[in-house]
Image: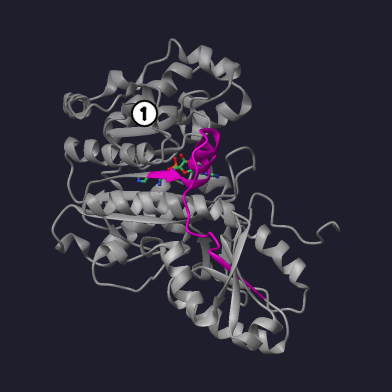
Amino acid sequence: MAEAKYRTPKGTHDILPEENRFMTYIKKAVRHRARQAGYQRIDTPLFERREIFERGIGSHTDIVEKELFTVSAKQSDKKEDAFVLRPEFTASICRSYIEHAMDQEPQPVALYSIGPLFRHDRPQKGRFRQFHQFNFEVIGLADASLDAQLIQVVTKIYSDLKILDRLNLQINNVGTSESRQAFIEALKDYFIGKERNLPELDRKRLETNPLRLLDSKEEDTQILLKSAPTLDQFLSDESREYHEALLSYLTEMEIPFVQNTGLVRGLDYYSQTVFEFWDESTGAQNAVGGGGRYDGLIELLGGKPTPGIGFAGGLERTIWHMKEAGVQAPHKDQVDVFVAQLGPEAKRKCLSLISELRDRGVHTIGALGEASLKSQMRHADRFGAKYTLLLGQMEVRDGTIILRDMAAGKQEQLKIKEAIPKILKLIGEKNLDTYTIKDYLGHVDED
Ligand code: HAM
């Protein structure tokens, strides 16, 4: 095959049919668990004003400092015409909560989203420039039982997808913004006179975002941190009680967790609870998902002080785990019937036959080209069709058709009008794909 002239941009990939089956399966599990727990779906634009993320995620975080994709109206260089592709859902959803006065609705408002996000990361394993998340937010109330319930929903999803045993839940409390500020000051004091021993990147972080030092991968930094003040020394009694309550709820729900006082997360808006689902074998790298409480975010975006908690899981990393664990994504893409034909009259008859089979819920494809019957049969095999219906010139003349059972390698001749009832019987009523929108949930199939 010739070398492709055009390829997907660096850090992006096509979601080919096989990958899409996993995506669909994950989305189904997410929607199912979201509905059970009263979450409603929200979709926000793929691009937003830059300030929303600057204020929310923080201007000195990696995401905002280095990873935003700018989108601008071609004819304009005015600042207000420049937007960025969304790097996450949370800030956008909080913007929407304020814009649509959702504080007037019964609280908390529970929302979920599934869709693509964009971060101009350095591409590597599990890290892409366009990736997908499923995301949950619970806004309007702060109670440790809400944190526990959100974690439980996520746990159930990973369990449904059969990868929960590959993951562990890391959890911490990062306190209020006041206690965090006091800790940051103490950390800065501790590093006075030690800056020269820090690698350059961490020296810069000490100035711009000292909390990021805590999850630095640099050995020198980690050694220095061993005798540095720790965040938990600065937690208020209230934060401690909140955390204890959350851990007791998790224990009650039999959700195992690892307390990790070093877990801070890479986004500035968090307060109190933070948590991540880590890969059992590789740890912090490539967490499949993470979240936490953001009680100050709505106010930062211009709303009234309103608490919130949320979580986002990466679809690509989830799929990776499913494949590693040998989990199959069930799908409905199988071909039931392949219709092969020869001659103009047969071709004409096949068109209505194919159409009727499809309407009756039979997945049907047909070779309507001029290929020989032999090569059409090869095609049927490659598509994995269960049955082939064969209509040649002779059959047209006799009003018959040949039905071949592909697995058994057996065939029989039928009257053409018997073909459809016979196929329906062979496939079985319950396997027919007769999709119609009905007004009860079992049959609504969102994308
Ligand atoms: P996050 O930790 O930045 O949190 O992202 C959550 C998950 O998205 C990650 O654990 C990972 O699975 C996936 N992810 C992030 N970046 C990439 C990437 N470049 N390539 C592939 N997958 C990626 C948030 O986004 C927060 N908004 C979560 C949240 C919701 N907090 C409160 N509410």
Q: Which amino acid lies under the numbered mark 1 shown in the image of this protein?
A: Leu
How far across and how far down the image is residue 194, in percent? 53, 15
Q: Position of residue 39 (x, y in %)?
A: 25, 54
Question: Does residue 233 belong to the magenta stretch?
Answer: no
Pick the front one: 307 or 362:
362
Looking at the figure, which quarter contains the N terminus? bottom right
Q: In which quarter of the image is residue 92?
A: bottom left
Q: For this view, does 23 lie left or right of residue 378?
A: left
Which image quadrant for residue 15?
bottom right
Q: Residue at x 72, y 69 (%)?
A: 376
Q: Residue at x 41, y 55 (%)?
A: 114
Ligand 1 within 8 Å, label 1 CB:
no
Q: Is residue 339 rendered magenta in the image? A: yes
Q: Which residue lies furthest to the right in this view?
A: 2
Q: Residue 393: which quarter of the image?
A: bottom right
- Callout 1: SS: strand
* Residue interval drawn in magenta: 312-340
Q: Which is more toward the observer, 320 or 330? A: 330
User: Which residue, given by chain and number where applicable, does mark 1 sit on?
Assistant: 169
Residue 78 point in image, percent of width and height: 55, 71
- Residue at horizontal 65 percent and vertical 81 percent from the top: 395
Q: In this view, does 364 lie to the left or right of 228?
A: right
Q: Mark 1: few, some, or many residues within 10 Å (few <14, many ≥20)?
A: many
Colour scheme used in the picture?
one colour
Query: From what the image shows, is residue 358 above or below residue 382?
Result: below
